[in-house]
């Protein structure tokens, strides 16, 4: 559950409405999921990866056809290799509501992406969307605050000087909620201590060098 809880909250900026289906809803942007998997497991092809186990086209009459792919996602976690398999499918040819015959040349790629998203969802990636929490506007607000805070903490942690750190912290503090402020303050104090120690180390080096001049 540690992995699940670390990846289940979706950034609202990475959510898109479902289109071209008979049902409505939301789905995570696939490339954002690839980024999250890379953050979690390492570079694609080394820490995790995608394999197409099999694929085929199914015909339904003269105009309707479906591309189906069996997709496998593998990953490395705590020295162990895991694998998940899921089906992905896309309409590859059909007649539109306007009576136009459509052929989707990208259907194989879309099917593989669909399978990948389903595999990653079984590890918890974008779990809030697939579990239905995204239907609650209050939850979406929580997710937005969560990712905003995460970005602010990253900026604080990456500050290379005390003045820059103070600037990042002041901006984050103004935008933050009461709930996230203790976390921001903790990150600020930790980075400030680190930068002060680094500064003292440099000053000590200067003093030591002056002794031998």
Image (cartoon, rainbow, N blue to C red):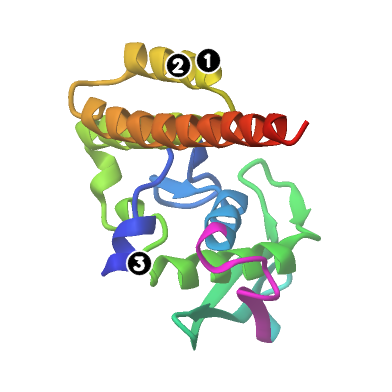
180 or 104: nearer the viewer: 180
**Can residue 178 be seen at all in this image of the molecule?**
yes
Residue 170, percent from left and from top? 40, 13
Mark 2 to mark 1 CA distance (whole Å): 5 Å
91 or 194: nearer the viewer: 194
Q: Which residue corresponds to mark 2?
A: 166
Task: For label 3, count other residues whose C-alpha is less than 10 Å away and answer few (under 14), some (14-19) or many (20+).
Answer: few
Q: Which residue corresponds to mark 3?
A: 3
Q: Quadrant of residue 111?
A: bottom right
Q: Is residue 31 above or below residue 147?
A: below
Residue 46 belongs to the span the image colors magenta? yes
101 or 128: nearer the viewer: 128
Span colored in magenta: 39-53
Mark 1 to mark 3 CA distance (whole Å): 35 Å
Residue reaching furthest to the front:
212
For the image, the number of numbered tags is 3
Q: Do the residues labelled 2 and 1 touch (CB within 8 Å)?
A: yes
Q: Is residue 14 above or below residue 63?
A: above
Q: Do the residues labelled 3 and 2 touch (CB within 8 Å)?
A: no
In the rendered structure, the answer to whether residue 55 lies left or right of residue 183 reads: right
Give the SS element for disc 2.
helix
Task: For label 1, count other residues whose C-alpha is less than 10 Å away and answer few (under 14), some (14-19) or many (20+).
Answer: few
Of the numbered discs 3 and 2, the one sitting upstream in the chain is 3
Of the numbered discs 1 and 3, the one sitting upstream in the chain is 3
In the rendered structure, the answer to whether residue 193 lies left or right of residue 72 reads: left
Mark 3 to mark 2 CA distance (whole Å): 32 Å
In the picture, the disc for residue 163 is 1
Task: For label 2, count other residues whose C-alpha is less than 10 Å away and answer few (under 14), some (14-19) or many (20+).
Answer: some
Q: Are marks 1 and 3 in contact (CB under 8 Å)?
A: no
Q: Which residue is located at x 45 percent, y 16 percent?
A: 166
Residue 139 belongs to the span the image colors magenta? no
């Amino acid at each position: 559950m540690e992995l699940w809880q670390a990846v289940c909250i979706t950034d609202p900026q990475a959510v898109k409405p479902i289109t071209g289906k008979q049902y409505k809803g939301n789905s995570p942007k696939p490339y954002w999921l690839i980024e999250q998997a890379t953050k979690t497991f390492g570079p694609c092809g080394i820490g995790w990866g995608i394999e197409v186990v099999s694929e085929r086209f199914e015909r339904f009459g003269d105009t309707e056809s479906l591309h189906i792919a069996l997709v496998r996602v593998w990953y490395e976690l705590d020295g162990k290799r895991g694998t998940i398999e899921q089906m992905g499918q896309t309409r590859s040819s059909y007649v539109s509501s306007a009576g136009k015959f459509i052929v989707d040349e990208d259907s194989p790629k879309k099917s593989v992406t669909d399978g990948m998203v389903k595999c990653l969802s079984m590890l918890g990636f974008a779990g809030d969307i697939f579990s239905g929490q995204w239907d609650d506007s209050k939850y979406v607000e929580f997710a937005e605050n969560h990712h905003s805070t995460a970005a602010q903490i990253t900026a604080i942690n990456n500050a290379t000087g005390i003045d820059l750190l103070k600037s990042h912290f002041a901006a984050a503090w103004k935008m933050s909620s009461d709930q996230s402020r203790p976390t921001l303050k903790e990150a600020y104090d930790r980075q400030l201590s680190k930068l002060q120690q680094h500064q003292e180390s440099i000053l000590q080096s200067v003093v030591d060098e002056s002794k031998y001049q």
